[in-house]
Image: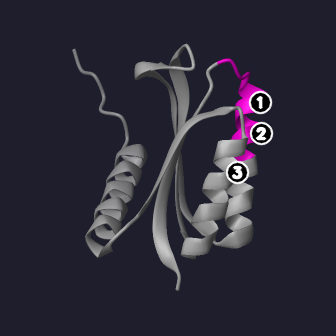
């Protein structure tokens, strides 16, 4: 049975830009091999609420995907084995959460396409 999931992982801040992109590409590719990526978003470098492994910030990345529950266990095992990943969270989305996520994506896309307001003096 295919369900929709949302996973967020936090990568260590000591990674270079290229290393971060490689880590994201690894996990997005792994998800694409075993399901369908619905949406992905790079949240960038953010401060952590509390130190994790003596780090006070991390690179956040969100991926929404459709897959089987068995794959989620495999994905989380990959996160656990990767020393670049500080924390991760994967949740199954119910119909209301799917609708909310779609609305959020549409609002973000509308804001990105809207022309910047002209500044008049």
Residue at mark 2: 22
Residue at mark 1: 19
Question: What percent of the width, then of the height, locates residue 77?
Answer: 66, 53
**Which residue is located at x 70 percent, y 51 percent?**
78
Question: What percent of the width, then of the height, locates residue 57?
Answer: 51, 19
The Cα–Cα distance between marks 3 and 2, rounded to whole angstroms, is: 15 Å
Residues at circles 2 and 1 in contact by the CB criterion of under 8 Å? yes
Looking at marks 3 and 1 on the same chain, the residue that comes earlier in the sequence is marked by: 1
Relative to the observer, which residue lies in front, 118 or 73?
A: 73
Circle nearer the viewer, 3 or 2: 3
Q: Residues within 10 Å of mark 2 (few under 14, many from 20)?
A: few
Give the left or right position of residue 38, taking residue 32 as reference. left
**Which residue is located at x 52 percent, y 86 percent?**
1
Provide the secondary structure element on which disc 2 rests: helix
Q: Give the extent of the magenta segment.
A: 14-25
| In this view, 111 is above or below 56 | below
Looking at marks 3 and 2 on the same chain, the residue that comes earlier in the sequence is marked by: 2
Residue 109 falls within the magenta-colored stretch: no
Question: What percent of the width, then of the height, locates residue 93?
Answer: 37, 67
Residue at mark 3: 78
Q: Looking at the rendering, in which quadrant would you find the C terminus?
A: top left
Chief SS of the magenta region? helix
Relative to the observer, which residue lies in front, 82 or 63?
A: 82
Provide the secondary structure element on which disc 3 rests: helix
**Which residue is located at x 72 percent, y 26 percent?**
17
Give the left or right position of residue 118, taking residue 63 as reference. left
The Cα–Cα distance between marks 3 and 1, rounded to whole angstroms, is: 17 Å
């Amino acid at each position: 049975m295919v369900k929709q999931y949302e996973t967020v992982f936090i990568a260590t801040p000591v990674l270079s830009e290229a290393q971060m992109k490689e880590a994201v590409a690894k996990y997005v590719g792994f998800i694409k091999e075993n399901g369908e990526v619905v949406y992905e978003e790079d949240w960038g470098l953010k401060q952590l609420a509390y130190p994790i492994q003596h780090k006070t910030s991390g690179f956040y990345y969100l991926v929404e995907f459709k897959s089987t529950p068995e794959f989620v266990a495999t994905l989380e095992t990959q996160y656990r084995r990767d020393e670049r990943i500080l924390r991760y969270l994967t949740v199954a989305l119910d119909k209301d959460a799917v609708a909310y996520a779609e609305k959020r994506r549409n609002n973000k896309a509308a804001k990105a396409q809207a022309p910047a307001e002209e500044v008049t003096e």
